[in-house]
Amino acid sequence: MTTLELRDVSKVFGEGPTEVDALRDVSLSVDGGELVAVMGPSGSGKSTLLTIAGSLEQPTRGEVLVLGAALSGMSRNERASLRRRSIGYVFQDFNLLAGLTAAENVSLPLELDGTPAKEARVAGLAALEELGLGDRSSRFPDELSGGERQRVAIARAVVGDRRLLLADEPSGALDSANGEAVMRLIRAACQRGVAGVVVTHDAQLASWADRVVFLRDGRVVDQTARPPGPESLLAPSQSS
Amino acid sequence: MSVRHALLALLSEGPKYGLQLRQEFEARTGEVWPLNVGQVYTTLQRLERDGLVVSDGTSEDGPQKGFRITPEGVEELAGWLRTPPDLSSPPRDELVIKVLIALRVPGVDVHEVMQVHRRYLVELMQEWTRLKEYAADRDLGFALVVDAELFRLDAVIRWLDAAEGRIKRAAFNSAGSAPSGLPKLPKKVGVRR
């Protein structure tokens, strides 16, 4: 099933002479279980694409469907509820709330959505446990390393029954070992059926995706074919 | 890849048979560089001729012949490990040349040409990353080889991205004016190989 679908989405910021086309007729479908990377230089429209896909911003033209439902047909409250329930976000700078522990940060979206506090806490702890952070659950963000903070952010993004995971430069300032750990976690979430979209300028990050879409000046200009599988690299013709 | 020094390294752990050396060589390099049998035995003959290994001399040349490293072999290996590979002169880079030429050919969109290469490089990286995801946890040597490939390909993509930005800025700055002459390259570019 198509979890996320963008149909001819355009976004214009400003008006008249200061008008900027951030996205131009972008179409993109992401199925459950699939991880798609959107790769482009800064200013190519990557982050705009992600905020529109996550219903944080509305397109100027075109349609966004999440789990088959058009966002344009929803009220503000319905969109907010969809965001809390079905969509997880991971940002470059983690965006954890400093006054809450790791466990509270993770269970917060569930509680906001009406899940009883105790139940939300159990789900939050389970998500942390799964990401190897069980022993960090009562720490505050400033007591965690950068890599741990990003894992907490991922736990928050996948807690409960999230179907769409949106990540903006998720390995941001992390070193390559932590960046790799982050991508392994995002892939693991996708293998459980979540649809993932990662926007990045970093080819090493993008190469974790099933499909890489190239964005230039707000347009999708190209995308990779599905990789033929690892065997091809081990063929004798590669020997030297 | 120096087969000669790889064999010395394997023998530095203790005496081994020809067949054993071939199998261990393949295992250590993650089977990324399959080696033909002949290469192992001819290299061992040359190492013996140069006094870097000695054979037990009892059996015929072949899989069952045993070898051990000499003190000269140990010294040769230590020296090789510390000798930097030649990175001082830029290699002849086919991709750089193609981008430079694409800039000059009428009717060719250099950005489209660059994107063809970028997509190919990213697809290659996706394959290496899959290998890392599924296999690298079990084999340190293999993980190191895969990382080296990923960093190398990543560097090429970064160059493409930087070059594309530079070309766009140059086009913006010289909008309306005639194209300049052929790019002037330092003499050393393209000297190696």
Image (cartoon, coloured by chain):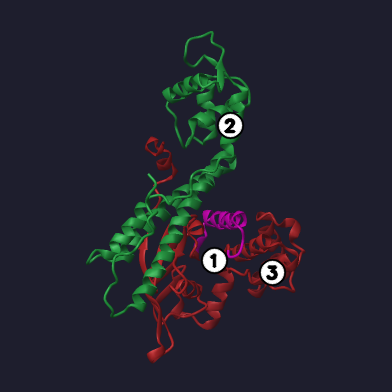
Vertical relation: A146 (above or below) A230: below
> Looking at the picture, how far across and down is residue B121, in whole percent?
40, 54
- Boundaries of the magenta span: A172-197
Assess disc 3: are there few (<14), some (14-19) or many (≥20) residues with their C-alpha within 10 Å of its C-alpha: many
How busy is the neighbourhood of tag 2: few (under 14 within 10 Å), some, or many (20 plus)? some
* Amino acid type at mark 1: Glu
In this figure, which residue is indicated by the disc labeled 1? A169
Residue A39 at least partly seen: yes
Which lettered chain is shown in red? A
On what subunit does the disc labeled 1 rest?
A: A
Task: Tell me: residue B80, above or below residue B133.
Answer: above
A134, B86: nearer the viewer: B86
**Residue A66 is inside the magenta segment:** no
Residue A1 makes an appearance in the image: no
Identify whether A31 is placed above or below B136: below
Residue B155 percent across, percent down from the top left: 47, 56
- Is residue A193 highlighted in magenta? yes
The residue beneath circle 3 is A105
Q: Main secondary structure of the magenta part?
A: helix
Residue type (three-letter) at the residue carrying disc 3: Asn
Task: Report how far apart the C-alphas of labels 1 and 3 lie in the structure.
Answer: 20 Å
